[in-house]
Amino acid sequence: MELLFENPAFGVFISIAAYGVGAWAKQKNGSPLANPLAIGAVLVILLINLSPLTLDSYQIGGDILTMFIVPVTTVLALHVYTQWHLLKENIIPVLCGCVAGCIASIVSVVTLCRIFNIEEALTASMLPKSVTTAIALELSETVGGIVPITVSAVIATGIMSAIVSPLFIKALRLNDPIAVGAAMGVSGHAVGTARALEYGQTEGAISSIALVLSGLITSVLFVIFY
């Protein structure tokens, strides 16, 4: 059993299987609360806590999946290129929405951390919570953040966006696919983009564009203020 747990393929299999269960639950339930990533994360945490599998053993395979974060993020640039015509037609509203969303994200983190007297290292760790993981990790390290906290904040932000965004879209009666896609991309990065694709191809395309632009804008803001 120990040899099985230390096999890198085991951690990969567990991750894929847990996400598969989450995707199945989402398909059966249809509720925004049934988020595959959230369900998968909970299942992996339960398995580590309730079985002989340790976190170190799981990470032998989990690190293989983590290795793909940077190349997958880079591939997003190709999607932006293929949707260049859509970006050119809506460049002003999308860009303004991304700038506003990035500023709101950073300001809200700083404000809440000051109110609750959170130490600087934790504040720095949560500042890039609304950009995709690969960019967030680099930004967090730049300002002295704690990488595991940053990863947790990014994942939690994406999951919350995927769950809450549909409620806001319905409450605010957003019918414009450009507005829906931009809002989900800038607030929920990759997880929000996956949710936006469920609304339609235009929403998904704009969301992926907003995801990339938000990463660039947040990086520029970090350079300016740090």
Image (spheres, rainbow, N blue to C red):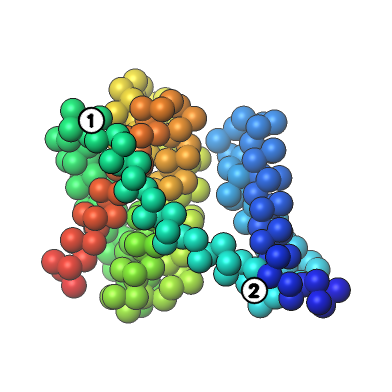
Q: Which amino acid is tagged 1?
A: His
Q: For the point 36% across and 63% down, which residue is it?
A: 136
Image quadrant assignment for residue 8: bottom right
* x and y percentages locating residue 81 in the rendered image: 28, 41
Q: Place residue 78 in its image quadrant.
A: top left
Q: Secondary structure at mark 1?
A: helix
> Residue 206 location in percent, x, y?
32, 35
**36 is higher (above) or lower (below) than 29:** below
Quarter where residue 114 is shown: bottom left
The disc at residue 142 is none
Above or below: residue 153 compared with residue 204: below
Counting from the top left corner in percent of width and height, residue 118 is at 36, 73
Mark 2–mark 1 contact, CB under 8 Å? no
Residue linked to disc 2: 60
Task: Please name the residue that numbered disc 1 is placed on.
Answer: 85
Quick one: 102 or 117, which is closer to the camera?
102
Determine whether the residue tagged by mark 2 lies in a helix, strand or loop. Answer: helix
Q: Residue at x 66, y 77 (%)?
A: 56
- Residue sitting at the far right: 1
Residue drawn at point x = 70 percent, y = 65 percent: 9
Name the N-terminal-most of marks 2 and 1.
2
Which residue corresponds to the image point at 43% horizontal and 26% vertical from the top-left? 200
